[in-house]
Amino acid sequence: MRKIIGLGESVLDIVFKEQQPKSANPGGSAFNAIIAIGRCGLPCCFLTEMGDDLVADFSMDFMQKNGVDTRFVTRIPATKSRISLAFLDEANEAKYQFYRDPEPGNLQYVMPEISEGDLVLISSFYAVNPAIRYRVAPFLRKAREAGAMIYYDVNFRPSHAADIPAVLDAVKENLELAHIVRGSLDDFKVLYGVSDADTIYAQLVSPYCKNLILTNGAEPVCIFTPNGKTEYPVQPIQTISTIGAGDNFNAGVLYSIYKKEIYREQLAGLSDDIWKEIYDTAQTFSREVCQSMENYVSQAFGLQMR
């Protein structure tokens, strides 16, 4: 049976508003998307590593309760799990501070069986981190060879600007392996110093991947495909927290692709109407998560989407 595989970092997000803690949620970019997908009842699993502590116990239990297969989570003995402090500003945008133990080298995943038609999500700095590239890249190559569709969310934060020389080759390889790329204008401005949408697609993405979803905050979203460029408006919304908005957008894209039974060979021929339906679903997921202090769509929303 077709499934969705997430690959990424696992953290505990402790969220502050006006200098007071407001919530604590298991998180991480791909993690947030996979929880949303699990809540919607789609078959999914998550590949990550965690410490050997109560935080990891909490995260493991949380995944299992939300329908995520945890058999491929690697627990590292005598290591603390990652902690993220998220500080919300007046617009409910978050600034982050991270705490983590060093990871031992040569850590190996227990890999899931990859079937033709599976969907693989990889995102953020985890997707290009030189310290773990030795296991991320082979997995992505294996997934592509097996016939899976790879969705790459660039999600490159300015806090990693000093790492750019060390990660550009990995970014390029991810673009080559991906069937759909999502990124923001800010991602490409940080990585390449380019902030024009058409230039980003023509020079930086389309030589490797023909499908790009390009966001720009409250400005229209551009979707580039082999058939051209289409812009979609972003509806304004009052937010409680923007944490997970982009991650749940990704979940909405993958949910729509799964439900519509779209396979990678069909992507080049998708009509604008189908892409609009995919975009509308992604926006629905993103708007939903902004209405709570959680990092994922609500359980009630997930039940409605089953």
Image: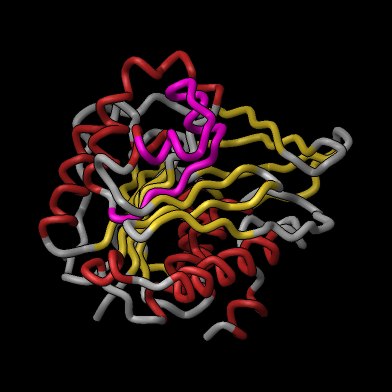
Instruction: Count every numbered label the image shows and give the total.
Output: 0
Q: Residue at the spot x=63%, y=55% of the render?
A: 295
Q: Indicate the quadrant where residue 149 lies.
A: bottom left
Relative side of 84 to 67, left or right: right
- The residue lying furthest to the front in this view is 228
- Vertical order, 259 against 139 (above or below): below
* Of residues 255 and 53, the one drawn nearer to the viewer in this rendering: 255
Is 243 placed left or right of 124 in the picture?
Answer: right
Residue 248 vertical position relative to residue 271 in the rendered view, above or below: above
Considering depth in this image, is 229 or 112 the residue closer to the camera? 229
Position in image of residue 305 (x %, y %): 56, 82
193, 43: nearer the viewer? 193
Q: Is residue 58 visible?
A: no
Residue at 48 percent across and 75 percent down: it is: 273
Residue 94: percent from left, percent from top: 71, 38
Q: Position of residue 110 (x, y in %)?
A: 20, 53
Is residue 90 a member of the stretch shown in magenta? no
The foreground one among 192 and 163 is 192
In the image, residue 194 lies in the stretch drawn in magenta? yes
Q: Residue furthest left?
A: 145
**Residue interval drawn in magenta:** 179-202
In this view of the protein, can residue 79 be seen by the observer? yes
In the figure, 8 relative to 41: above or below?
above
Residue visible at 46% across and 70% down? 272
Residue at image x 32%, y 33%? 171
Quarter that holds the N terminus: bottom left
Q: Position of residue 103 (x, y in %)?
A: 34, 29
